[in-house]
Image (cartoon, rainbow, N blue to C red):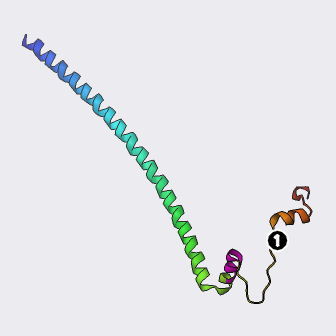
Amino acid sequence: MTIRVHKIILLLLFVCIIALGAFFSTQWIGNWRVYMATQEGNRELKQELESLHREVNKHEAYLKRLLTDPVFFDSVVRQRLGYTREDEVVYRFEEEDLKQQLPSFNFNSM
């Protein structure tokens, strides 16, 4: 009888080990998927951060040029703010008026 009890105990122990292995492997697989999704999110955020750094550098260069180049500053102020110099006349045309007055040109026919 003792041999039979030992076999039953070993069988139960084996079943418990298999069950624990299955449980922990499913937990590990779930955690692995979360880890991989987090890594993908990190890669996307790093790409976005690099893009934002490039944009900041572009804006910094624009600002530096705006502050150091008087000709560029003058052109930006004139174009964006509509400033003029003294005794200067600026003619502004509405875009719709120009379309009506100018004949349409088809660039695809060339």
For the N terminus, which image quadrant? top left
Instruction: Please tell me which residue lies in front, 66 or 83.
Output: 83
Q: Which residues are magenta?
A: 74-81
Q: Is residue 37 left or right of residue 14?
A: right
Instruction: Please tell me which residue lies in front, 12 or 52.
Output: 52
Q: Which percent across, then down, holds residue 78?
A: 71, 79
Q: Classify 10 Å Cα crowding around label 1: few (below 14), some (14-19), many (20 and above).
A: few
Displayed quadrant of residue 70: bottom right
Residue at the (44%, 53%) spot, across then down:
42
In the rendered view, tell whether residue 95 sits above or below residue 65: above
- Within the magenta stretch, is there residue 25? no
Q: Magenta-highlighted stretch: main secondary structure?
A: helix
- In the image as oriented, which residue stretches furthest toward the bottom? 86
Q: Is residue 90 left or right of residue 17?
A: right
For the C terminus, which image quadrant? bottom right
Q: Is residue 26 left or right of residue 62?
A: left
In the rendered view, tell whether residue 104 sits above or below residue 16: below
Instruction: Please tell me which residue lies in front, 82 or 63.
Output: 82
What amino acid type is highlighted by mark number 1?
Phe
Q: Which percent across, then down, holds residue 4?
A: 12, 12
Residue at the (57%, 72%) spot, across then down:
59
SS state under label 1:
loop
In the rendered view, tell whether residue 19 sits above or below residue 82: above
Residue at the disc numbered 1: 93
Q: Which percent across, then down, holds residue 3?
A: 10, 13
Q: Which percent across, then down, holds residue 80?
A: 68, 74
